Image (cartoon, rainbow, N blue to C red):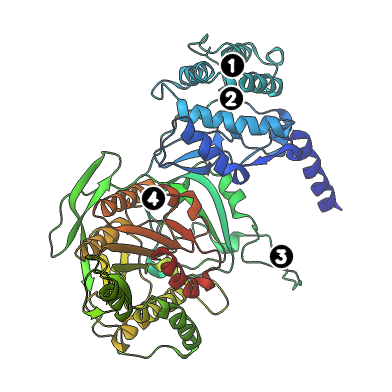
Amino acid sequence: MEEQVGIAWHKLINRLAARNHPEAAVELSDITRDVALLFRALGGEAGLAVQAGAATRHGAKRSLLERLAGRASKADLAWVDREALRLPALIDVYPTTALNLDLYFWLVALCAVDPQPDQVWLIRNQAAVLAITHTYPGLAARYHRLVEAEIARRPDPRQLPPDEAQQEQAIRNALLQPGSIISLPPARYPPHPVLLWLRPDQTTAVSGRAHPSPEQSSQTASTLQSDQKRRLAQHEELPARQGGLLLFRPESIFSWTEYAKVEHETQDNEDQNLAHAADDLDVISIARDQKSIARKLRMSLDLSAAERNTHSLSGDSVQPEWDYRTHTLNPDQCRIHHIPMTDAPPCALPEYLKRDKQHMQRQFSALQPVRLRFKGQTEGKDIDIEPYIRHVAHRSGTESRFYIDQRKRERDLSCLLLADLSLSTEAWVSEGKRIIDVIRDSLFLFSEALSVSRDRFALYGFSSKQRTDIRFQTLKAFDEDYDDVVRGRIQQVNPAYYTRMGAAIRQASDILGQQKSRERLLLLLTDGKPNDADHYEGRYGIEDTRKALISARQQGLRPFCVTVDQDAQEYLPHIFGKDSFIIIRKPSELPTRLPLLYAQLTH
């Protein structure tokens, strides 16, 4: 009975304390494309992704009902950092869907314009409002509607203490007349968050960066929860747990209890939504631990990059790397380790691929070099009898188009296929297949098809462990024949480490650039975005990869990406361009679709 009353009380008090409107909610995931388009149209940086940001603690005084319900003083606000445009994952603060949607677009405009980003929060937001309403008059009406709704939901100054009332009135004046307030009156509590403004600046106290080891990354949890919010985090060392000394005598405990065996359900982790638990933390401290867990939560953490080592590397093969923050191409930053895979035992094509092989070879046989006969030529080795007789009989001037010329039609192209062999390809895509298995089958069928068309091709794989160890595996070079030796190398590929894509593309471009073919295709096969165990993730890796592709095009190469990452639409258009990539929605179809895609690209 007590439990039922407690549950009923919890539901009641939360319903009374709630100030949102779930029936009018708008989710960021439903409008991400529109938001990104508006952000870039208003002048926002093209390289920034659109992601959900975590709630921000504001410290304003809570109402009695909010304190009884245990609601934290947090609000979903918008901001921009060097990696992404951060917006609330869901907006339901206003009573209509139209107003909540307007708030999304208004926040995007604020983030895109923001003329005084170095000013204090109050002046910065007022300046941004003035700039937007002056430059884009069409947004002024939307802003006035939002101000009316925002003031209606804010606390009434008449019900606040004098100091808080003055502060609240100043906020209202700043909303109604942007630019009229230069400072806020002091008060005991900070003001209630202004949902129409950007988030106040917050510092991130981070001592380092933690990344799971490849062995840890390969472990799969019983349940994996995914969350798109960006949360503030810091790295901490795992505390030492040593046995302590009891400071009291156990016999001094005078109470006792009797053990009774009771049947009841237990779980390793009763918290079914780890994301809600993470929302309660202002800063998430992370540490490396070798123990397995019952449940995982995948989220994006705002960890500042560790101090970058920019000293040059030496070795047989090194590549530069682009730093978008300084707009410099740092030379000799990445060391390439060439792995020839000569110890792989030869093997035949797997039996289960032989039917697909026959089908592919029948289709690609049409691309084989053929010898064509062209009649009516002015010169050639053979004479076409009938035109020659007519020429002699009628003495038709000096016309001499009675020769036959035979020409061999060949496809003058070279293709280098670069496969992502990072540890993420160990993920399962079906009951019996991993991504690495799908990639391996794709390499097999791709090679079988091109061996029939006689196109020049090479196969390479790559993975990385920071900039000092980019592993570049040679599966088939351009001057090698496709045989059981190459099949053995393909059979031996295994996932490892991370995806430093820019350095691998530059190395592949150097190899492909040495080919003399008229058309040179650089085909990238991957399952995710660029990342590594250092600062090479997020926008840094994306911009470096994009710069490597720009350099490849300048060499006359044609890059194209084939990916099975279902979220690739968020970043691949910026990296490759809208017409230079394809997303395979069903990874299991990749082996049969890759050769056909190649045929379309080289038709």
Question: In the shown orientation, is residue 361 left or right of residue 21?
Answer: left
Is residue 419 visible to us here? yes
The x and y percentages for residue 282 are 52, 41
Classify mark 3: helix, strand or loop. loop
Classify mark 2: helix, strand or loop. loop
The residue that label 1 is drawn on is: 175
Residue under the image location 50 percent in, 45 percent down: 230
Q: Mark 3–mark 1 contact, CB under 8 Å? A: no
Residue type at numbered disc 3? Thr
Residue type at numbered disc 4? Ile
Residue type at numbered disc 2? Val
Of the residues under marks 2 and 3, which one precedes in the sequence? 2
Label 2 crowding class (10 Å Cα cut-off): few <14, some 14-19, many 20+? some
Question: In the shown orientation, is residue 337 left or right of residue 493?
Answer: left
Classify mark 4: helix, strand or loop. helix
The residue that label 4 is drawn on is: 575
Of the residues under marks 2 and 1, which one precedes in the sequence? 1
Of the residues under marks 1 and 4, which one precedes in the sequence? 1
Label 3 crowding class (10 Å Cα cut-off): few <14, some 14-19, many 20+? few
| Front tag of 2 and 1 | 1
Q: Which mark is drawn over residue 194?
A: 2
Q: Quadrant of the rendered structure where residue 101 is?
A: top right
The residue that label 3 is drawn on is: 257
| Front tag of 3 and 1 | 1
Q: Mark 2–mark 3 contact, CB under 8 Å? A: no
Classify mark 1: helix, strand or loop. helix
Of the residues under marks 3 and 1, which one precedes in the sequence? 1
| Front tag of 1 and 4 | 4
Judging depth in this view, the residue of 243 and 351 nearest the camera is 351
How far apart marks 4 and 2 lie (CA) works out to 35 Å
| Front tag of 4 and 2 | 4
How far apart marks 1 and 4 lie (CA) works out to 39 Å
